[in-house]
Image: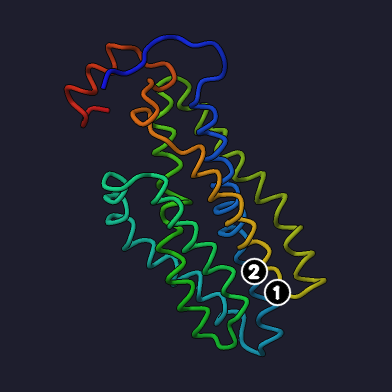
Amino acid sequence: MATNTAKKKGIHFAWFVLVGVLLMMGLCRGGINSGMGLFFQPISADMHIGVGEVAMMSSISALVTMFWSPFAGRLLDKFDIRIVTIVGVIVQAGCFAALSLVDAVWGFYALAALMAFGSVFVTQLVGPMMINRWFKDKNGLAMGIMMSFVAICSAVLSPVVSSIIASSGWRMGYIVLGVLALVVVIPAALFLFRTPEQKNTLPLGATEEDAKAQAADPAAA
């Protein structure tokens, strides 16, 4: 199918993709991942277990992430990016919300391990991949905006979640942040996550020659 190389007035679709990436990374990485530590002390006090025992869930999640990442990367080339993203956020945010139901320390460990399988996609792999696919030009700018937005979301959401924990308990904190990620990221992935090939257009800054070179050697993209 021929790629549409005609210049169109208006905002390039790459910027809409970036909005979706920002929402995903802001909530899943800046919100959920960065907010994990906010729950350790409240859980420790409520369940009468050591903070270190609770914090072990972060170490377990990091170990799973380390071993799973090489295999997870291969899936991005085999499945529709929307499916990968939606499954990833359902696993990560769903497990995060499910932490509100835990009554024993082993439950935190089990859900933290499972959560990491989805977190790898929505906090590490999908965002940079989408930016690299869509931004031949202004790639560094897009990456910088993404990482800055993660930091902003972490700075904004941390006090909000802390306030929820203080007023309604740590279980409600898990539910609110997990459900928020689900209801925002899933629609964003459905409507905004497309590859240039799916949109029949070129990445921002790409030329027809670039498209021909990519078609001749996809590995060079």
Q: In this view, does 61 lie to the left or right of 100?
A: left
Residue wearing tag 1: 170
Q: In the picture provided, is 211 more to the left or to the right than 167?
A: left
Residue at the outermost right position: 167
Q: How crowded is mark 2: few (under 14 residues within 10 Å), some or many (20 or more)?
A: many
**Amino acid carrying mark 2 in the image:** Tyr
Q: Which residue is drawn at 56% across and 75% down?
A: 55
Q: Where is residue 134 in the image (x, y as percent from the top left)?
A: 42, 28
Amino acid marked by disc 1: Trp
Residue ID at (26%, 22%) = 1
Residue drawn where x is 58% and y is 75% of the image: 99
* Horizontal arrangement in the rendering, residue 153 relative to residue 137 (left or right): right
> How many numbered circles are shown?
2
Residue 173 versus residue 185 in the image, above or below: below
Q: In this view, does 12 lie above or below 154?
A: above
Q: Is the C-beta separation of discs 1 and 2 under 8 Å?
A: yes
- How far apart marks 1 and 2 lie (CA) works out to 6 Å
- Residue corresponding to mark 2: 174
User: Callout 1: 10 Å neighbours few (<14), some, many (20+)?
Assistant: many
Of 106 and 55, nearer the camera is 106
Q: Position of residue 144 (x, y in %)?
A: 54, 33
Q: Quadrant of residue 220?
A: top left
Residue 100 lies, in percent from the top left, at 62, 76
Q: In this view, does 201 lie above or below 96?
A: above
Q: Residue 182 at x, y = what percent?
A: 57, 57
Q: In which quarter of the image is residue 36?
A: bottom right
Q: Residue at x 72, y 50 (%)?
A: 156
Query: Taking 198 as reference, is 11 left or right?
Result: right
Q: What element carries label 1?
A: helix
In which quadrant will I find the C terminus? top left
* Local secondary structure at mark 2: helix
Q: In which quarter of the image is residue 131?
A: top left
